[in-house]
Amino acid sequence: MTMQTIEKTAVCIIGAGPAGAATSMMLSNLKIHHYIIDKAVFPRDKTCGDGLILYAYKSMELLGGNLFQNFLNNPKFIHSKNIQLHIADNFRVNFKESNDRNMVISYAKRIDFDDFLVNHLSEKYAHKNFGSAVKTIENRENGVFLTLKNGKEILSKVIVGADGAQSIVARKLAKNKPNSKLMSTFVCAYFKDVKNLPLKNDAEVRLVYKDVLLFFYVFPLADGHVNVSLGGRSDQIKKHQINLVEEIEHIIKTHNKVKDKFLGATKVGSWRGWTIPFHFGTQKIVGDRYLLVGDAAGLSNAFYKEGIGTGMMSGIIAAKNIEKCLLQNNFSENFLRNYEEEIKNEFHKLLKFSHYSLRFANFKKPFYYMASLLKSTIESKSQALMKKRSYK
Ligand SMILES: Cc1cc2nc3c(=O)[nH]c(=O)nc-3n(C[C@H](O)[C@H](O)[C@H](O)COP(=O)(O)OP(=O)(O)OC[C@H]3O[C@@H](n4cnc5c(N)ncnc54)[C@H](O)[C@@H]3O)c2cc1C
């Protein structure tokens, strides 16, 4: 019989998606040894629209080294200077980057982007445990005790829940419950041979008014595939019994601004569905010996669904707070509240505005009226706002 020894660490990150990887990279910058666990082995896929904006750029810049430059030089990732938001068939608002800047959106298949991030984890400070899920979590007096599916046992002074929308840390330690009013449900798939896409890789986002407001995205990719997705608020989709796969196939076949592009196009793989949580501000994100980042903390943007960048940024803020915990040897909820405060300072206004925009956009006519009235102001002011939350 072999005796299982408990491995001990100061910090353990659960989840190596963008939020967990950014936490790990920042901890390494601060010379803090840590464990990082993921149930998957990379490269692994994640259901996503594959669009990177604002905080994704900012975070890669802040993480330093060659990360941002390597991202820009990577042939698997492509970039564009314009996002077209189609509010009606013949009316759109453009979120355009200024002439002196290179991009407002980039596209990266998550199988490649997450692998790219994981390949930048420190060999020295990040102790990787990939390929086995965390099965149980227990908060004990001397640390958080974790067991993995492969039988490994780990005791950590503090843990970071970076394990996504169905976080085991959020469920077991924070006791958070999913709130379908504060999450979106989306389906997406890759297509090949899509024609007549907007010029220069512009992002195409359409508001589709059915019984509920749905968002339809078409994002081009480096390998010639196109990521097509559709979704809306989870509770409304459930209430109106909307079948997202049927709806998106209907749009592709019949929408007068979409259908011609998909004549002769083929779906690669199957439709995949997943949720995007935006409950930040209503649920716990810190407690004794743990903090939550990314989707586990509900940090996606309710309106335009940015979750990769906000997740990465939250990881950076988390790592800096963990450094303080270790210096003070204090892992209490009270002490970790500082992390929550800093997250609020960074995101509160933006996320509140995005909730408000989503609610308002549900009212088709007033939203259209307001958007057409303010189109030129929105387009000119958005450049400064985007710059503030993006790369320098
Ligand atoms: C259809 C769709 C389209 C989207 N489009 C965009 C977009 O275009 N741009 C954008 O910015 N955001 C988009 N999002 C949101 C974005 O995908 C998420 O916000 C982002 O992935 C959050 O990153 P994360 O690191 O917090 O979580 P994840 O990326 O979900 O990573 C969590 C990691 O934790 C691991 N894990 C989970 N449970 C365990 C466990 N028990 N033990 C060990 N490991 C575990 C998983 O394997 C995974 O690697 C979209 C989401 C969906 C569903």
Image (cartoon, rainbow, N blue to C red):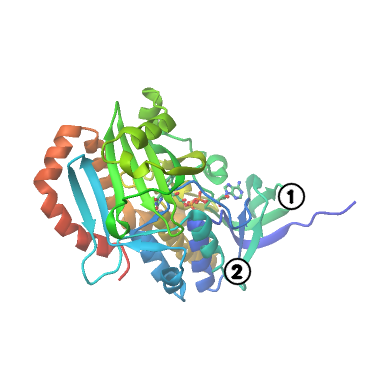
Toward which corner of the image does residue 173 lie, by quadrant?
top right
The image shows residue 102 at horizontal and vertical percentages of: 29, 68
Determine which residue is flagged by label 2.
33
Give the mark toward the camera: 1 or 2. 1
In the displayed structure, 116 sits above or below 211; it is below
| Front one among 280 and 150 | 150
Q: Secondary structure at mark 1?
A: loop
Of labels 1 and 2, earlier in sequence is 2
Which residue is at 17% across, 41% downward? 90
Q: Secondary structure at mark 2?
A: loop
Q: Is residue 254 visible?
A: yes
Image side of residue 45 versus residue 178, left or right: right
In the displayed structure, 63 sits above or below 389; it is below
What amino acid is at disc 1?
Answer: Asn
The image shows residue 200 at horizontal and vertical percentages of: 30, 60
For disc 2, does the CB lie below 8 Å from ligand 1? no
Toward which corner of the image does residue 87 lie, by quadrant?
top left
What amino acid is at disc 2?
Answer: His
| Spatial CA span between label 1 and label 2 | 22 Å
Image side of residue 354 versus residue 288, left or right: left
Q: Is residue 232 visible?
A: no
The image shows residue 316 at horizontal and vertical percentages of: 44, 63
* Residue lying furthest front: 264
Determine which residue is flagged by label 1.
150
The image shows residue 304 at horizontal and vertical percentages of: 32, 47
Which residue is at 20% across, 57% downward? 382
Image side of residue 261 versus residue 168, left or right: left
Which residue is at 21% across, 37% downward? 360
Q: How many marks?
A: 2
Q: Are marks 1 and 2 in contact (CB under 8 Å)?
A: no
* Residue lying furthest top: 240
| Front one among 352 and 131 | 131
